[in-house]
Amino acid sequence: MNQPSVWTGQTVAPGIGLGPAFLLRRERKAVPRLGITDVDHQLQRLDDAIERAAKLLHVHRDRAAKRFGDVIARIFDTHLMILEDEPAFDEIREMIRSEKVAPRFAVYTILEQYAKRFEGQDDTYFQDRAQDVRDVCRRLVNQLDGEADTVLSDIPDEPVVLLAAELNPTDILRLPHKNIIAVATDAGGATSHTAILTRTLGVPSVVGLRNLSKAVKRGDTVVVNGNSGKVIVHPDAEQLKTYQRKQGEYQEFVASLKDICDSRAETEDGHVILLKGNVEMPSEAESVIRHGGDGVGLFRTEYLVLTHGGLPDEETQFEAYRDVILSLKGRPTTFRTFDLGGDKAFPGAGIPAEDNPFMGWRAIRIGLDRPEIMKPQLRAILRAALHGPANLMFPMISTLEELFAAKEILAEVHGDLDADGVEFDRDVPVGMMVEVPSVALLASQFAPHVDFFSIGTNDLVQFTMAVDRGNEQVAGLHQPFNPAVLNLIQMTADAAHMAQIPVSICGEMAGQPLATLLLMGLGLDELSTSPSLVPEVKKLILSSTMVDARKLAEESLRMNTAPQVREHLLEYMKSRFSNLPIWFEPGT
Ligand code: PEP
Ligand code: MG
């Protein structure tokens, strides 16, 4: 009988999921050099395998198109293109003929040579192509072995808890979502982009569990508590019963939140906070409405580069932006210009590998150096804005000169559109992200030059605490409740209000129930978070007062350490909201 083991990671998406484990493994198969005598037969086997792999890729492509739209489905076109690469497959056939080796050995040997060549390039675009070539290689070897197409499509047709050492954004887009009860990964911090994407699956998820995937076998019973960050492998009968009960309570609570979907987030003493959703893909806009959001507070447009497999042209972007605006039916959308680089050095963006990418050539730095990337995007946003309310914001601004330079490019784009006789909205509000400490400290100097601030706490905490936001090894130092961070937030909010512009938070902190009152008390006008977290945050706002929120913020600002602030908030929230099954403190 297996003993229960409890693992602790970082919560990414709330809820409780329990069921049999399915492990996503990326181990490479052994491919020994096996000789053959029946060359023609083996060449035929290869052609059949290619045909079957292509058919399956078309199935995946259609599935992705239905779920996410054509733009995302294009990921699979890359794999189809590799399968259709004549020179590579001529080399494979030649090797089978001349060296009389089994097709799987020839496929592996030649495609691995291609992958290595890609890997050796400086540009991350080509490095990522190496991954694609290996994916196609694995598909073909599996076909030749008579096995299922890919590890992902291997997920059984029944509900499972998905465990993996890591998930990359492409995996997440390809998962057959309906069968996934919960997700737990070894790698990742709660604000890593993989974690943010995992949240869009809408199932309980925990990341940063270090070696969990090595300790679990397929079919083992696993409980994932996305509210507390705990994962239990082989729960005993008692634990299973408890978690089934907690799961039921939580589901009931979530269902009860439907009643407040259409209400404004207004405190008992009459203060309204705007609650918006963050989206990575146009198809998620619908989820913002379903969860009662007031609009999209952050559209991470750079994900279009990922799903497009490269930089989309103006027209492709225009269509995506217009579709989001239209699906929001009058609610505003804030479009952030491409925040590429860091852990979003997506294929096709031409971003070279760097030693320190989070602090390297990324976001607005790329936009300013490459107006040929930024200008088509600005044109697309300004044109799409004719179809409904839109805001525009620049990511990762660190100096006033950068802000002025970005606005200069925007002015040039206005001029170009006029010169081209193209209609556009010339009154789109222009804001900026506050996610670098230099900006928060000088917020009063930036505020007169923008229409709004949006605080990106994921990066602001990363840079204030000098802690890699995606590294589970140092996750404990990613402290949004550190008084240093709270002071920077307050300075930003005060500067915004002095200049009479609104200020929002669009980092993951905005969706943390423990932070809701604190952020209101610090003066935030808007919170923007993953759409699925909007109802819980709304419930808290509806049940609280601004007087209490301000008091809580003042007390927190006087504290010295993040644990002290957490403890203080926790005590208050637990006593005040003991009637709600909200997990305020991960780890309990
Ligand atoms: C942030 O840094 O908090 C933010 C919202 O931007 P991103 O997570 O996309 O870097
Ligand atoms: Mg950021």
Image (cartoon, helix red, strand yellow):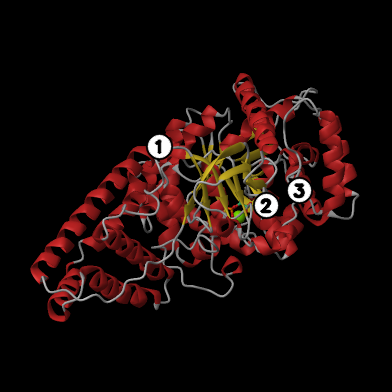
Does the numbered disc 2 mark a residue whose Cβ is under 8 Å from ligand 1?
no
- Classed neighbour count for the residue bearing mark 2: other residues with Cα under 10 Å, few (<14), some (14–19), many (≥20): some
* Tag 2 residue: 7
Asked if marks 2 and 1 touch (Cβ < 8 Å), the reply is no
Query: Residue 138: image x %, image y %?
Result: 33, 62
Relative to 10, residue 103 above or below = below
How many marks the image carries: the answer is: 3
Alpha-carbon distance for marks 3 and 1?
34 Å
Q: Nearer the viewer, mark 3 or mark 1?
A: 1
- Classed neighbour count for the residue bearing mark 3: other residues with Cα under 10 Å, few (<14), some (14–19), many (≥20): many
- Looking at the rendering, in which quadrant would you find the C terminus? top right
Alpha-carbon distance for marks 2 and 1?
42 Å
Please give the label number shown on residue 181: none
Q: Amino acid at mark 2?
A: Trp
| Residue at left offset 57%, top offset 36% | 531
| Residue at left offset 77%, top offset 44% | 498
Relative to 514, residue 562 above or below = below
Please give the label number shown on residue 495: 3
Query: Residue 366: image x %, image y %?
Result: 50, 65
Choose the circle earlier in sequence order: 3 or 1.
1
Give the residue furthest to the top: 259
Q: Amino acid at mark 1?
A: Asp
Relative to 491, residue 99 above or below = below
Label 2 element class: strand
Task: Choose top left, top right, bottom left or bottom right for residue 534.
Answer: top right
Task: Choose top left, top right, bottom left or bottom right for residue 15.
Answer: top right
Look at the image and tell me whether residue 503 can be seen.
no
Label 3 element class: helix
- Classed neighbour count for the residue bearing mark 1: other residues with Cα under 10 Å, few (<14), some (14–19), many (≥20): some
* Tag 1 residue: 323
Q: Nearer the viewer, residue 66 or 473?
A: 473
